[in-house]
């Protein structure tokens, strides 16, 4: 009687412990979700680890196609930083798909309008938005890795069979049977077998441990797909149907992965501790892992498709949140695709999204722009603002301007270059290779025109050759269906290229030994210089600055150095 009472008390305590844990988890989730809902339109303060961006880029690297934003352009525009500014995803699927979307410009009106409809759905329908946010919060992330770090390497595990595990399980029962005949002998044999099983278990488990997190994520993915399919979300009927079809193909994985995943989610529950020892001694989770592995290997495409669909949905929520955060500081761009239509770009109140108090500029242009101006006057920032606006217009259909109209472009930049010691290339070699890729794309047969941005053409070589080569390169970029924005300090180019490019400039104002930059785009070439004036303002000897100014004036007057 006492034994039954004691057993009942243990069961009651276990149930009570589990109930308290469940209530605490539910309360924490409710508070977290409420914070997420209230934070819509305010961004987030997420910190990114050193290697995190490389894992976030895995979906993109798995789905690389022609026409995506290349590494040079991505780095020139500091897109990792802009991605982090935009991203408010709650799941790894959202993280990775947003990165992919920002590197994959859309080239068709029909596709971009589908994305726009999805963005507007979650901006306008709060209940629908909260519904999917709950799903993505439940999905979460994979700690330090991407699911694609493992999906492509499942074959490295080789053929895993359960025969030997089952054989050692039979050995345990055989030893128990021997104990009925001879307790001392059976006990010794049982201890030997159990010790073998424990040692062998940890050896085998170490090999598969890195894949456990990916299996947990796949189970979470399937749970979220099931939850998504239970929700009636307008405009997502096709996506929900396809998710359901993919889910059905993964039933074998769901059956065979529970023990594997639950062994990794211990919470100190006494019942779980007992089950842990049974798993180790009888290889339960290793046997189930091998069965689940077979199911995953046969359905990698379905897993990828579910991640794609869920990632696309969450990215629409994130874009809507970013628009809400920008308030009136964005527009929905007007984009068109007509093969024989003249290339042009028209933008009003353009600014760079990194700037807290930006000076906005407007532009309407049908041929290339040659941009001149003094140091620090705003040339590079303007080029980046225009390139970023074009990229965001064609990827997340959201532009940091009051209006934007242009064709669907192929976008390339050559701006923040540096020499490559590892590859043995000097700055000049890196630069000409970078520009060559733009020239090659401009000559291609792709139907979309090229929009390119070049900061300081051929700055890595001497003046005479730079001006001569720059003139011919810029003329080549002015032909065909290419729209080129280029900044230069070489005022000679404004005259040499005036038949091919519109001249614009930024200027500075110097007053009372101080310099001021209005950052307003002005028509025509620059007529002022500030490099020598800055030397004077920083306290260089007057003899140096006066003679430098005199030399510059003599060169401008006669065209040669004396």
Image (tube, rainbow, N blue to C red):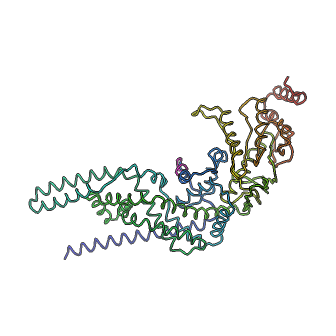
Q: Quadrant of residue 250?
A: bottom left
On-image quarter of the N terminus:
bottom left
Q: Which residues are magenta?
A: 50-55
User: Residue 467 or 66: which is nearer the viewer?
Assistant: 66
* Up-down relation of residue 528 to residue 211 (above or below): above
Q: Is residue 550 left or right of residue 85?
A: right
Magenta run includes residue 52: yes
Q: Residue at x 43, y 50 (%)?
A: 153
Relative image position of residue 537 (x, y in whole percent): 80, 35
User: Going by the picture, which residue comes out furthest to the top?
Assistant: 562
User: What kind of secondary structure does the magenta stretch mostly adopt?
Assistant: helix
Q: Is residue 346 left or right of residue 286?
A: right
User: Going by the picture, which residue comes out furthest to the right?
Assistant: 557
User: Going by the picture, which residue comes out furthest to the bottom?
Assistant: 1
User: Residue 531 or 504: which is nearer the viewer?
Assistant: 504
On-image quarter of the C terminus:
top right
* Up-down relation of residue 155 to residue 93 (above or below): above
Q: Quadrant of residue 11?
A: bottom left
Q: Is residue 20 left or right of residue 284?
A: right
User: Residue 501 or 261: which is nearer the viewer?
Assistant: 501
Magenta run includes residue 421: no
Is residue 41 visible in the rendered structure shown here?
A: no
Q: Quadrant of residue 526?
A: top right
Count of numbered circles on the image: 0
Q: Is residue 280 left or right of residue 409?
A: left
Is residue 393 visible in the rendered structure shown here?
A: yes
Relative image position of residue 75 (x, y in whole percent): 64, 45
User: Residue 121 or 247: which is nearer the viewer?
Assistant: 247
Relative image position of residue 69 (x, y in whole percent): 64, 49
């Amino acid at each position: 009687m006492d034994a039954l009472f004691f057993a009942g008390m243990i069961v009651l305590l276990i149930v009570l412990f589990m109930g308290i844990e469940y209530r605490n988890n539910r309360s924490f989730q409710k508070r977290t979700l409420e914070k997420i809902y209230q934070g819509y339109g305010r961004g987030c303060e997420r910190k990114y680890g050193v290697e995190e961006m490389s894992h976030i880029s895995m979906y993109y690297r798995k789905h690389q196609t022609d026409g995506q934003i290349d590494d040079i352009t991505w780095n020139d525009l500091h897109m990792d930083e802009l991605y982090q500014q935009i991203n408010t995803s709650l799941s790894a699927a959202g993280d990775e798909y947003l990165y992919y979307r920002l590197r994959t410009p859309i080239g068709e009106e029909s596709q971009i309008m589908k994305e726009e409809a999805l963005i507007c759905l979650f901006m306008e329908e709060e209940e629908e938005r909260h519904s999917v946010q709950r799903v993505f919060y439940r999905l979460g992330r994979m700690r330090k890795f991407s699911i694609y770090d493992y999906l492509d390497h499942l074959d490295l595990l080789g053929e895993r069979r359960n025969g030997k595990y089952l054989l050692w399980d039979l050995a345990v029962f055989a030893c128990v049977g021997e104990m009925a005949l001879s307790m001392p002998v059976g006990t010794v044999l049982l201890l030997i077998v159990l010790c073998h099983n424990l040692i062998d278990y940890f050896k085998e488990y170490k090999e598969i441990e890195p894949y456990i997190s990916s299996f947990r994520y796949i189970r979470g993915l399937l749970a979220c797909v099931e939850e998504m399919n239970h929700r009636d979300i307008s405009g997502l009927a096709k996506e929900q149907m396809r998710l359901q079809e993919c889910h059905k193909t993964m039933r074998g994985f769901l059956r065979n992965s529970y023990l594997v995943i639950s062994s990794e989610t211990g919470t100190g529950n006494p019942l779980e501790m007992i089950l842990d020892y049974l798993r180790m001694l009888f290889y339960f989770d290793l046997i189930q892992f091998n069965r689940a592995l077979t199911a995953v290997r046969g359905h990698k495409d379905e897993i990828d498709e579910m991640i794609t669909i869920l990632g696309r949905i969450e990215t629409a929520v994130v874009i809507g949140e970013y628009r809400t955060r920008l308030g009136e500081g964005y527009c929905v761009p007007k984009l068109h695709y007509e093969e024989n239509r003249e290339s042009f770009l028209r933008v009003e109140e353009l600014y760079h999204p990194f700037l807290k108090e930006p000076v906005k500029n407007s532009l309407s242009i049908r041929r290339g722009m040659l941009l001149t101006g003094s140091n620090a006057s705003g040339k590079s920032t303007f080029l980046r603002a225009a390139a970023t606006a074009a990229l965001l217009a064609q990827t997340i259909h959201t532009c940091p301007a009051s209006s934007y109209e242009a064709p669907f472009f192929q976008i390339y930049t050559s701006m923040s270059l540096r020499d490559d010691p590892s590859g043995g290339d000097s700055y000049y070699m890196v630069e000409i290779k970078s520009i060559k890729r733009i020239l090659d794309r401009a000559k291609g047969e792709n139907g979309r025109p090229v929009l390119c941005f070049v900061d300081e053409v051929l700055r890595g070589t001497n003046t005479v050759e730079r001006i001569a080569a720059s003139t011919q390169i810029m003329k080549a970029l002015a032909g065909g269906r290419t729209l080129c924005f280029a900044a230069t300090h070489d005022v000679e180019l404004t005259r040499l290229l005036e038949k091919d490019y519109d001249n614009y400039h930024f200027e500075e104002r110097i007053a009372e030994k101080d310099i001021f930059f209005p950052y307003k785009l002005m028509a025509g070439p620059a007529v002022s210089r500030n490099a020598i004036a800055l030397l004077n303002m920083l306290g260089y000897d007057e003899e140096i600055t006066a003679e430098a100014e005199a030399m510059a004036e003599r060169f401008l007057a006669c065209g040669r150095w004396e």
